[in-house]
Amino acid sequence: MKFRTEVDLNESLKKIEIEDKIFSIGSCFASEMSDLFRQGQLQTVNNPFGTVFNPFSINTAIQRLHDAEWYHEEELIVFNDEYISLDHHTSFDTRYIHQTLQKINDKIEEGNRFLQDANWIIITYGTSFIYEFEPKKKLVANCHKIPQSFFKKRLLTQQEITDSVYNTIINLKDICRDEVQILFTVSPVRHTKDGMIENQLSKSKLITAIHEVISEMQDCYYLPVYEILMDDLRDYRFYKDDMIHPNSQAVNYIFEKFGQAYFSREAQDFIKENFKIQKALEHRSEDEKDPKFIEFREKLNQRIANQQEKAKHKIF
């Protein structure tokens, strides 16, 4: 007897290899997946604009990265003595205009360079809701804790979402390597502050738009991450204490499913060993001159050297 509805990922004909470059952008779930790529010592860049949730703002970010278009002083606003870009996450805010612009434009340069060699793109949409900053009549990626009275909240229209998805794909196909693989996901994190019914409507609009666009595009696919958590792992033991965000067990389960469908056998073995090495590197000793600890580190360094022989890029 089966006691759960398991959701599987279709096996990809094209596989992620050890030297492939993976670019990810979107919600905090995109960052969690990127962290696992990084621990597995794959080449990855995640969220050059910081965490971004809605497809309109993600498209804005991809457009700026594609064009390598720097931000300038007139595009920033000042709030609480900090210089802010409404296209970016709060992690870019500083008290000095040159520092904010430096952080933003350094990431644009890094993202542009990486995208030109990227083999895989993972885009995770979180919500169809967006806020408009009324003083500038500008749709924003983040409200930066500015009072709500300055914003108007609304759902993106279906046309706005499909246009954003389509334009994102066009820009990525233009700047990335030929036959770049673009994978779309919808974040399984429920935006409960929007309301449960409203959250479901928001997610549904995203899923509909993705399927509508990728049905006409090559090398674009939908990963059922949302469905895995909602249907396969529909138990609160797979959530953090807030009952909203998936816990590490759930994220690792999804990553394992993804790996089985998308990693080559060589990449799977490479990542698995690197996970073990990463965990061993966390081991500390109160006496670093202890012969047993020295022997442990020598063996660990040899394992790292063996792994480095499999990769052209620097690991650990």
Image: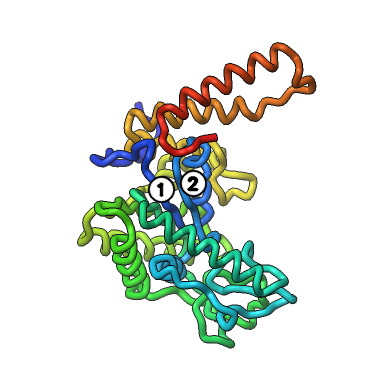
- Tell me if residue 63 comes above or below residue 284 in the rendering: below
Is label 1 or label 2 in front? 1
Q: Are marks 1 and 2 in contact (CB under 8 Å)?
A: yes
Counting other residues with Cα less than 10 Å from the Cα at mark 1, is it few (<14), some (14-19), or many (20 or more)?
A: many
Q: Is residue 316 left or right of residue 162?
A: right
| Image quadrant containing the C terminus | top right
Residue nearest the observer in this picture, 70 or 212: 70
Disc 2 marks which residue?
34
- Residue 98 lies, in percent from the top left, at 65, 72
- The amino acid type found where label 2 is placed reads Ser
Residue at 50%, 57% in the rendered image: 47
For the view shown, which residue lies furthest in the top direction?
291
As helix, strand or loop, the secondary structure at mark 1 comes to: strand
| Image quadrant containing the N terminus | top left
For residue 268, the mark is none
- Tell me if residue 34 comes above or below residue 176 in the rendering: above
- Mark 1 or mark 2, earlier in chain: 1
Q: Quadrant of residue 175?
A: bottom left
Q: Is residue 252 visible?
A: yes
Q: Is residue 55 visible?
A: no
Disc 1 marks which residue?
22
Q: Is residue 291 left or right of residue 175?
A: right
- Residue 159 lies, in percent from the top left, at 32, 75
